[in-house]
Structure formats: structure tokens, C-alpha cells
Image: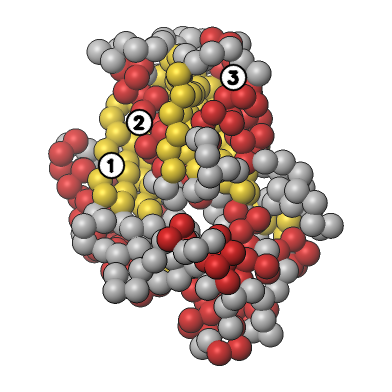
Amino acid sequence: MQDVFITGTGSFLPGAPVDNGSMEERIGLLSEHSRKLKAASLRQNGIKSRHYAIDAGGNYLFTNAEMAAQAILSACDLARLDPRRIGYLATSTTQGDLLVPGHASAVHAGLGAGPMEVSSHQSVCGSSMMAIKSSYLNIRAGEHDTAVACGSEFSSRWFQPGFYSAIDFAGLSAEEALQYEFLRWTLSDGAAALVMESRADDSRPRLRIDWIEQKSFADRFPNCMYAGSRTADPGQFKPWAHYGAPAEACADGAVALRQDFDLLQQMFPVWMGYFLEVLDKRRLSPEDVRHFLPHYSARSLGNRMKTLLTRSGAMIPEERWFNNQHRVGNVGSASIFLMIDQLMREAALQPGDRVLCFVPESGRCLAAFMCMTVV
């Protein structure tokens, strides 16, 4: 079994950073309560700026696949790798540009590289680790010597007011409206990528992937963060494609993205229990972790994570936590890639440092971990 090294990282964040005061120019308002719910959402998520692939005039500047391809080219540049040498490409996203074909095919086409094996991974934040593990295992097994994994999102197109035209916000309580509004003021656009190889250049710090763990708990929970059905209630659940026409699904409010916050809170003990399970299985002490990269959808949820880890005796010292959400936003499947890219480019990494990544996903409850060592 071959070792796997991250030899290059890259990001693509569209346009100039958008501050909190300029968000409405890109995604608009849904109701007279939108500004109040915007303020509440921003207090919780702690985000100060983000990027959108839609400009203030409503023009679409890039496709999801184009952003992913740009991030991959940036990662190849840092790895000093000709994109034509990529043997395997794994992509992750919440929703590609098309229903068919797969997102990886569109990203591959945008690279301008030669034929390669591809794999598309679709979920929410956790699809990132699915793509990374797919690339990791292909190199580990000797199927390929060079692979790329990327995460990319174009969330802002889902947040245009027209997607919510069927929702009667005037008849909703503030708590009910927040299920729609919070995600609009939290998720944003962008892409990032990792180049993985079976060999590393000894002249520069590189990350060796030691192991990746991922587990779904969908057998315990209904949908929590979802789009494609008007409700997650099993008795009333109806996928968007089961309507007579796509327009009927849209008119019934089945296309709008939403989040069940009560259900989200119930997932935290499950994620923390899995955290402890992984630490025990891998015989990893919190003190062994030099850089901890946790993905969370809001600063308030990150604080909840810290509280539960402290109570369980598994808290990694807070000064070792690294998260860049406040300046790039929550970019879904691209978030963990963006953190790794910034860590590789800006942190003073030392040989032997252990790096632990944690990606929980509330879609239907799953969590993933990746442990790396600086070499």
C-alpha cells in the first residue's frame, strides 16, 4: 500500500469579498422580516465577508464547474504538476450545474487536460471527505500515482427570491422563516482543491494522509438540511421529480433549501460520540493534535462543539483551532479544502505536526475525520 501525500492546494473565490452590508445586492430580500432575520443569522454565524459568483447586477459570472477547474489549476501550480498528468479526479458539491451528466465530467472538461478517471460525489459538506477518501484510496491501492479532489459550491443561485415565491412568509413565524433565511445569510460560493501523489518533494513541507474515517447516521434521523421536497415528514414526503412537472414542484415550495434547527441540535451528541470513538480507535490524544480544522456552519455551533468536547475530556486546546469561515463564509463542500489550502500556504508547519480535520454534515447526519502528518 502506497503512502499518500498532499503536494498542492488551491482555491478560487469569485469576485471581491462581499461584506455584510452588501449581501442584499446579491441575493435580495424575501419579506419584511428578512433584515431582522439577517441580523440574527449573522450574529450566530460570525461571518464578516464572503464571495458570490453573481454580481450586483444579477449576472452569473461563473459556473460551479468553472470555479472547480480554476481551483484545481491553482493546486496543480503549487504542486508543480502538469494537469495532463492527473490520473484520477474526484469532485464534491451540493448541486452541480446540471442534473445530468455528473459534476466530475463538467469539471474535467473545464480543465482542458487529457482523458482521466473521474468520480462525482454529491451531498452537502460531507461530500468533501467522500471525494478526498476516494482519491486517497485510489493512490493507496496503487491504481493511480496522482489524483485530485475538489469541492465547489454555487449556493447564491439557490438564494434568489424567485426560488421562494411559493412560500408565504407573511404567514410564518420568525422561527419558521429562519429555517429558510439562515442558510441564505450563511452559505456562499467558491471552490478549492487538493493534489495528492504517491511521492513527496523533500524540499518543501507536505501533508501525509494517515487515515480517513466517515460514518453516516441517517438511520437515526430524517432530513435536516434539504431541498427537493416540501417537507421531511415521511407521511407527506414527495420528491420534486414525483410532481407532474418541475414547475409544479417549484409552485409547491419543494425546491427551496431549508434547515431544521431543532433536529440539528440533536445531532451534536451523536457527532461528539463519534469523535470519541475515532480518537479511541486511532489511539489519538487531543494533545497530539497540533492543528485542528473543524468545519461548522456557524460560530455559535463551533462554541457548542467546544463545550461538548470540554465536558467529554476531548477538547483540543483552543489556540490550535484553525477556521477561516469568518472571512470566506460557509462554502459547504469547499470549506475543508479552503482551510487546508490556507494552512498549507500560511501556517508555520513543522515536520511531525499532526493535523486533524473534522467535517460534520447536518443533511441527514454524518461526520468525517481526516488525520495528516507534516513531512
In the rendered image, residue 256, in percent from the top left (x then y), is placed at 54, 66
Seen as rendered, the residue at the extreme front is 244
- Position of the C terminus, as image quadrant, is top left
Residue that numbered label 1 is attached to = 214
Q: Which badge, 3 or 2, comes first in the chain's sequence?
A: 3
Q: Residues within 10 Å of mark 1 (few under 14, many from 20)?
A: some
For the N terminus, which image quadrant?
top left
Q: Disc 1 marks which amino acid?
A: Gln
Give the residue pinned by disc 2: 133
Q: Quarter of the image holding residue 269? A: bottom left
Q: Circle 2 — which element?
A: helix
* Mark 3 surroundings: few (<14), some (14-19) or many (≥20) residues within 10 A: many
Label 2–label 1 contact, CB within 8 A: yes
Residue corresponding to mark 3: 76
* C-alpha distance separating marks 3 and 2: 19 Å
Q: Could you tell me the amino acid type at mark 2?
A: Lys
Task: Residue 105: name its quadrant.
Answer: top right
- Which residue is more in the foreground, 257 or 68? 257
Residue 252 lies, in percent from the top left, at 52, 73
Most foreground residue, 345 or 180: 180
The image position of residue 136, as x and y in percent, is 36, 24
The residue depicted at 52 percent of the width and 35 percent of the height is 101
The earlier-in-sequence mark between 1 and 3 is 3
Front residue of 238/352: it is: 238
Q: Secondary structure at mark 3?
A: helix
Residue 339, placed above or below residue 374: below
| Position of 140 relative to 332 (above/below) | above
Are the residues tagged 1 and 3 within 8 Å (C-beta)? no
